[in-house]
Amino acid sequence: MIEAMNLTLKPGAMTLSELRAVWTAAAPLTLAAEAYPVIEAAAAAVQAIVAKGDAAYGINTGFGLLAKTRIPDEKLEQLQRNLILSHSVGTGELMSDAVCRLILLMKIGSLARGYSGVRPLIVNTLIALYNAGIMPAIPAKGSVGASGDLAPLSHMTLAMLGVGQVRVNGVLMDAVDALKAANIEPVVLAAKEGLALINGTQVSTALALHGLFMAERLLEAGMVSGALSLDAAKGSDSPFDARVHEVRGQPGQIAAAAIYRKLVSDSAIRASHLVGDERVQDPYCLRCQPQVMGACWDIINNAARTLLIEANAVTDNPLLFKDGELSVVVSGGNFHAEPVAFAADTLALAIAEIGSISERRVSLLIDATLSGLPPFLVRDPGVNSGFMIAHVTAAALASENKSLAHPGSVDTIPTSANQEDHVSMATYAARRLDDMAQNTAVIIGIELLAAAQGIDFHRPLKTSPHLEHVHEQLRQKVPFYEEDRFFAPDIEAAKGMVMRGELSASCKELFTSLHP
């Protein structure tokens, strides 16, 4: 169980460690005190614009192609409420609590930077929802990743109004009842506040961060299971020699090779075939692990840098800036989530490749002509099918990931009567990462079972101390495959170890510098 950390949010200065902690578990959240004067000044600037009477987009006009329509002051509150109600058009499954926590956190951080013109009341209400564990019921589909994540963020905002449903401790309930139970007053939105709440890339970014953090776990688990497969197949650790990787110079590859060397160090199985092994070179899925996983490592870290910037960004529209003594309203396009879409697409490539090379190692292990192990990793093959169809499942999921890895960012579709004529599709690009990660976790889980089975066939020889610990952790959940049995629960147990980060936790000190 990961202990939740108290978090003081400093707008514009969140770290990946803080974001990972919020993704992992709920924890009390406070906003740094120095943020409030900035928020108050921006809110006062909006009220001054309203009082002056000049037309300003998003403050006293309609939206999109209706921007030329001037809205009377007495209807500004109705304008903002109508905006939220009309834009709450999402569909599909509800986003998880982990993703919702990230959405709330990033929206609080963005508004608190003081460029959006909302009152402190709005920020405090979002903090109150977060701390009360009231998660807005946000459907996963309905955003194209430009003009902000309008539909999903509208569903987030509904919770503040006491409209629709929310989820508390995993249970759906009416928002008005949840607010009442938590002593939170529903808000009445003032000028610009509705638009500030629903404009922005927080949903796309939260989904992409969810994909990033799963990709990190998959990378670690894939390296551990790959090292275990290497020993199960009596492969060579010579390709991990530091000199090989230093002359190429790729940083991820160099770091990955170092981890592989440590993972397999002091293996009695390896020592048993140092002399007299007729094989000159191993198949690529064993030999080229540092090259493949190191490249995945590099692009995962590149995506992490982009997403950390976006998590701290101000991405609504229009924005307020000081121009001498005056506040000016500037319309721009920070809501366009192209950076998030590109980051999500590269994460998809990494997740697909981690699963692809893992599937190849499963195929190798069940092939007696390549692995030297019993056919399909079971005694008395023929009577027993062993891992035959488990590999088919791995192959099916690896192939599915190839289709899912097609980039979302190259797609676009015009919306809002061609006013919003180029969009990023970042929300889809990020959302599909969960399906891909689930697929890859199953593949690695199957590999883990297969590799552990192979290690057992080499007894009494032992693998390395690190990998023996991993093997022991698995065997506490899944026994040796002696004969055919109902196999799906074993695969789910191994997948769970991957998704919870238990494989890398078994070798924790090796992965301390893996992610920024």
Image: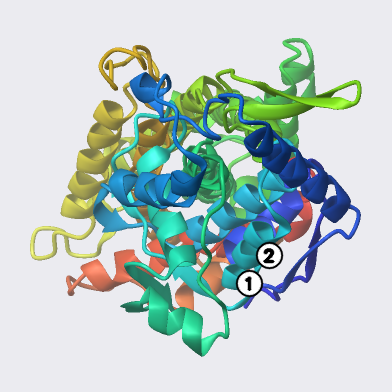
In the rendered view, would you say 490 is above or below 288? below
Work out whether residue 365 can be spotted: no
Q: Depth check: 239 or 374 in front?
A: 239
- Dot 1: within a 10 Å radius of its alpha carbon, few (fewer than 14), some, or many (20 or more) residues? many
Q: Residue at x 32, y 67 (%)?
A: 164
Determine the CA span between mark 1 and mark 2: 6 Å
Left or right position of 325 against 507: right
Quadrant in which the N terminus appears: bottom right
Left or right position of 424 against 505: left
User: Which percent across, then down, holds residue 352?
Assistant: 39, 33
Q: Amino acid at mark 2?
A: Asn
Left or right position of 378 against 291: left
Q: Amino acid at mark 1?
A: Ala
In the rendered view, would you say 187 is above or below 403? below
Q: Give the numbered dot on residue 124.
A: 2
Q: Which of the 4 image quadrants contains residue 64?
A: top left
- Dot 2: within a 10 Å radius of its alpha carbon, few (fewer than 14), some, or many (20 or more) residues? some
Question: In this figure, which residue is indicated by the disc labeled 1?
Answer: 128
Work out whether residue 411 can be spotted: yes
User: Which percent across, then down, holds residue 36?
Assistant: 83, 55
Q: Which of the 4 image quadrants contains residue 54?
A: top right
User: Which percent across, then down, holds residue 83?
Assistant: 38, 44
Determine whether label 1 and label 2 are within 8 Å by CB. Answer: yes
Q: Residue at x 50, y 33 (%)?
A: 286
Q: Which element carries disc 2, helix, strand or loop?
A: helix
Q: Residue at x 59, y 59 (%)?
A: 23
In the rendered view, would you say 286 is above or below 75? above
Quadrant in which the C terminus appears: top right
User: Which percent across, then down, holds residue 100?
Assistant: 49, 58
